[in-house]
Image (cartoon, rainbow, N blue to C red):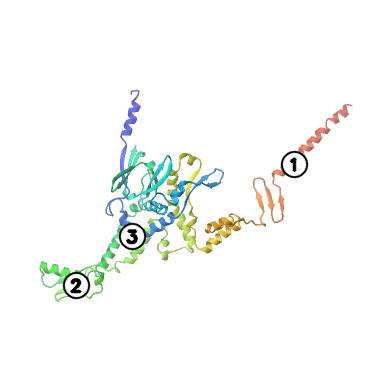
Amino acid sequence: MGLFDFLREDNSNTANLEERMYSTGITSFYGVTTAHEDDVVRIPTVQAILEIIGGTIAQLPVYLYKDNGDGSIERVEDHREYLLNNEPNSMQTAYNFKKNIVKDYLLHGGSYSYIESVRNEVTGLYNLESKNLTVKLYKKRGYRVEDADIILNGECGQEIFKPHELMICLKESEDGLTSKGALYYGKSIFKVVNEELNYTENIYKNGTLPLGVLQAKGRLTRDAVERLRESWSRLYSGSSNAGKTVILEEGLEYKAVSLNPRDLLLNENKKDNISDICRLFNIPESLVNPNANKYGSLEQNNIFFLQYTLSPIICAIEDGLNKSLLLEEEKEKGMFFAFDTSEVLRTTEKERYESLKVGLDTGIITLNEARYKLNLKGIKDDIMKWSLGSVLYYPETGEMKIPNMGIGIDGYDKPNQKQGEDKDEQSGSSSDSDPSAPDQELQ
């Protein structure tokens, strides 16, 4: 082995990187991988779910915080908050920006946004449609991603991005750059639902007349068959011709050869499909179908929605924000982005006032803080309510105070310190008297 063989070996490994292509949006239902986004969003249940989840998260504000390391967290004013809560770029609103992130996350399993920056300062954020993206991975030894190209296929050609230029939010990923969403896992149910929609559309198009066969006693020529077919279609097809009485000439007989919608149990199947789609998106069916509500109150329903539906999505977006929009030194200082999810739990006015009253009576929040949560203007002299009947205990000193009685009880440090001082005084007095005693004995 030569002295510099290790250099040639390293170059060889770099040159033999494994190249793989991943497309986030592929062909049609009859492909082997995923369904197409345009075919899926036409399903009413899917459209409702995208509106509910996407609209809920899109209206939540995102703030930048700093963990001080002593258990306290403070809000940090930063320009990036303006991009995430107001205008991510010169043309788009923050609501639509976050809503598109959620849509791509749910359907494709991942969202990709371009970060426009000048000297480490973020100046703009732009959505890249996942259905038009192709990810090219360069792997080493089959598992380690050495490099990647995210290719945007647009009308004006292709644009290539590097991972550090994008904010990436993924549902599940083994390489940190690609993922799978509902278009992949729900391709079968989406195909069935679309077939049912097409079938229902054709029923109304044909005037609800079932598919049938016209039989003639005598033999018809080709021209006669074509004229009969055209006449039948013109007279009885279409919703405008629904309910017309069929009149047959002598020698013709009509026989239905297809099942009607009632025989096919379309209504029952539609209910089952709605339930399956809701389970696919991990959303309570009661939000799509009010008749399926199994919770006693709207608040309980919203809590379930927040914990099991929104929280995983919010966590993935927050991770993407922290990874891509924060500098390394900011991460080391304990800075992080987080959604304010208190808006999700807003229910009735009565429940809101009752929850704020509890916080105000227990002294957790001030009067102005409670008014701010109701979007009301604060008063001049802010107050905090404390109960006189409570005993105030200070764990650090062991001291207790009873405001109602106006007395205080010293903690465990002070009595020990006082006893120590008394012992010092006694030892000091005895030491002062001891020298005189021997002197007297010597005399």
Q: Find disc 3 in the rendering and name its residue.
A: 43
Q: Position of residue 249 (x, y in %)?
A: 15, 76
Q: Amino acid at mark 3?
A: Ile
Left or right, 293 with respect to 370, comes to left
Q: Position of residue 274 (x, y in %)?
A: 36, 61
Q: Quadrant of residue 428?
A: top right
Q: Tell me what residue is drawn at x 85 percent, y 29 percent.
A: 438
Name the N-terminal-most of marks 2 and 3: 3
Q: CA distance from mark 1 to mark 2?
A: 112 Å
Q: Quadrant of residue 371?
A: bottom right
As drawn, 195 above or below 416: below
Say which of marks 2 and 3 sits in front.
3
Q: Residues within 10 Å of mark 2 (few under 14, many from 20)?
A: few
Q: Residues within 10 Å of mark 1 (few under 14, many from 20)?
A: few
Q: Considering the numbered disc 2 on the image, is that residue within a helix, a strand or a loop? A: strand
Residue 254, label in figure:
2
Q: Tell me what residue is drawn at x 47 percent, y 59 percent.
A: 302
Q: Considering the numbered disc 1 on the image, is that residue within a helix, a strand or a loop? A: helix
Quadrant for the C terminus in the image: top right
Name the N-terminal-most of marks 1 and 3: 3
The answer to whether mark 1 and mark 2 are in CB contact below 8 A is no
Q: Amino acid at mark 2?
A: Tyr
Q: Position of residue 344 (x, y in %)?
A: 47, 57
Left or right, 382 with respect to 154, comes to right
Q: Considering the numbered disc 3 on the image, is that residue within a helix, a strand or a loop? A: loop
Q: Find disc 1 in the rendering and name its residue.
A: 419
